[in-house]
Amino acid sequence: GNVTRLDDPLTGLHTTVYYFCCYTPQEKATIKRALREDMVWSSFVIDYDSFACNLDHDNVTVYLHALPSDQSGLFDLAHTIEATVRAAGVAIPTRETLFHMTLARVGYEYPTDDVVEYFLDNSDDWNFGSLTMDHFFIEDEVIRASDA
């Protein structure tokens, strides 16, 4: 099948917490300052040990995702970000969708059903790995955990 894109495992694999692309430059500056100076959060471990796929809104691209089975740390971080940004006077939506790390983008002809079946049937035999979430990026700025 057709793999349309793989992210570089050393530089491209990521989990998006929020998209800040739709804010004005002034709002972005306020958000960055608030996250850097006002937000208090602690690092935590994320285990990417689950798998899923979904069809993009273009109805052409299928995404294959590694998922953290325990999403609570990421949701706690998202809610802390939301509270910090709102306290700084910038509107931000509440994060409700699950967190994921895109492994590949594939076309319809890719054997997605076979891949999903393999990962579901062999879930005890694989793990995508763990990482310590102790910083994140917003554009060119690094926001670090209080204990990092």
Image: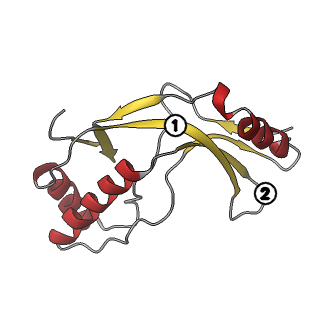
Where does residue 118 sit, x and y in percent of width and height? 78, 35
Q: Callout 2, which amino acid?
A: Val
Identify which residue is drawn at 51% across, 45% down: 69
Of residues 125 and 63, the one nearer the viewer is 125
> In terms of sequence position, does the residue under pointer 2 or pointer 1 come before the other?
1
Say the numbered circle drawn on residue 86.
none
- Locate residue 30: give its quadrant: bottom left
* Image quadrant occupied by the N terminus: top right
Element assignment for label 2: loop
- Crowding around mark 1 (Cα neighbors within 10 Å: few <14, some 14 to 19, many 20+) is many
- Give the distance between the C-alpha atoms of the residues marked 2 and 1, in whole angstroms: 26 Å
* Image quadrant occupied by the C terminus: top left
Q: Callout 1, which amino acid?
A: Tyr
Q: Decide if residue 66 is on the left or right side of residue 86.
A: right
Res 126 visible = yes
Where does residue 119 sit, x and y in percent of width and height? 72, 36
Q: Mark 2 points at which residue?
A: 60
Identify which residue is drawn at 30% across, 38% down: 44
Q: Decide if residue 136 is on the left or right side of residue 87.
A: right
For the image, the number of numbered tags is 2
Element assignment for label 1: strand
Identify which residue is drawn at 66% across, 25% down: 125
Closer to viewer: mark 2 or mark 1: 1
Circles 2 and 1: CB atoms closer than 8 Å: no
Q: Name the residue under label 1.
A: 48
